[in-house]
Amino acid sequence: MTDTMKAAVVTRFGAPLEIQELEIPTPGPGEALIKTLYSGVCHTDLHAAHGDWPVKPTPPFVPGHEGAGEVVAVGEGVTRLAVGDWAGNAWLWSACGACEWCETGRETLCPKAQYGGYTKNGSFGQYMLVDARFAPRIPKSVDLAAVAPILCAGVTVYKGLKVSEVKPGQWVLISGVGGLGHIAVQYAVAMGMRVVTVDVDDAKSRLARKHGAEYAFNAAVEGNGLAAKIKEVTGGGVHGALVTAVNGKAFPQAMGALRSGGTVSLVGLPPEAFPLDIFSTVLFGLTVRGSLVGTRKDMEEAIDFFARGLIKPTYTVQPLAEVNDIFDDMIAAKIDGRVVMDLQH
């Protein structure tokens, strides 16, 4: 193993990422070193590189939290992972394990949490460090390139669907059929839900139907009649909604499509706020719920759905050197499904 690796580095917010030669890190106590073979590219990586959110990462840093590869070294005290295992990194890089939230199964809300590719260097490099307690274990029966999107997009929508409280046989609306949404459709179908989708692109609607959506609406075509159309085809409205879209208009649209007692689960993070009709929310007993990725158990379950062949992300593979082109395509909404980078070529 050489002493250096290639990595895409954010040197300043809004600037193109630089492909640099960095020293390969050494795992400390409780850590493992993974040779990163593939990494999905998430919209969060773009937000991180641009410094879009109120709590910002500190340049220089290496983005990425959908990395998958092989464990090549472990630090002191590591027993959960061994050299030769397949594992990955995740948005939830670590949590303290001792706070109120960790102790009650809500580790994603830990105030001392660390985040992959944000507060900790991530998977846009040929090697990465992980906290061995939190690194998702990957079965060797799967395609590593295909599993990469599961490690953020997959677990995020899987958890979002769980907290929407939609039961098998009930209707769920999935708003936005991009990198997260097209996987959400598949999880919803695998969980026994009936699916309606909303996007502004007919190609995304075709992708949704391919993955099992019964109805796929174009919000740009339906306009103000969208909620009424959804309520018509679902017999009174959806029981829950998952909003993956990064467009503020999608949120009130999803609220309007709910039936009484319904829940909208929010995972998309657009920069703008959205208006909440308090009267309707109270009158119809609606719930608005934020959902932040998933716990280690959620991750294990999400990977298991994939490993059993129930989830098949739509993705293309591109080399690390094209990372800035990938971001440009993401901004222009030209990506069909997910882009996975090949870190070794």
Image (cartoon, helix red, strand yellow):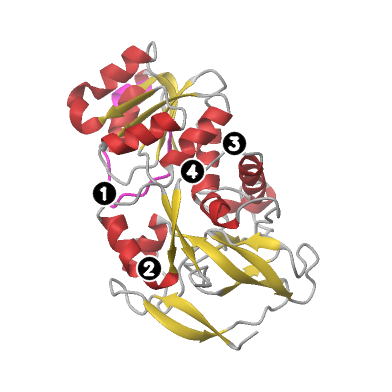
Indicate the secondary structure of the residue bearing disc 3. Answer: loop
Position above or below: 286 against 16: above
Q: CA distance from mark 4 to mark 1?
A: 18 Å
Q: Amino acid at mark 3?
A: Leu
Q: Nearer the viewer, mark 2 or mark 1?
A: 2
Looking at the image, how many numbered discs can be counted on the residues?
A: 4
* Residue bearing the label numbered 3: 310
Q: Which mark is residue 323?
A: 2
Q: Which mark is residue 272?
A: 1
- Residue 278 falls within the magenta-colored stretch: yes
Q: Amino acid at mark 2?
A: Val
> Would you say the residues marked 4 and 3 are in contact, meaning their CB atoms lie under 8 Å apart?
no
- Mark 4 residue crowding within 10 angstroms, few (<14) / some (14–19) / many (20+): many
Q: Amino acid at mark 1?
A: Glu
Q: Nearer the viewer, mark 4 or mark 3?
A: 3
Q: Which mark is residue 5?
A: none
Indicate the secondary structure of the residue bearing disc 4. Answer: loop
* Residue bearing the label numbered 4: 291
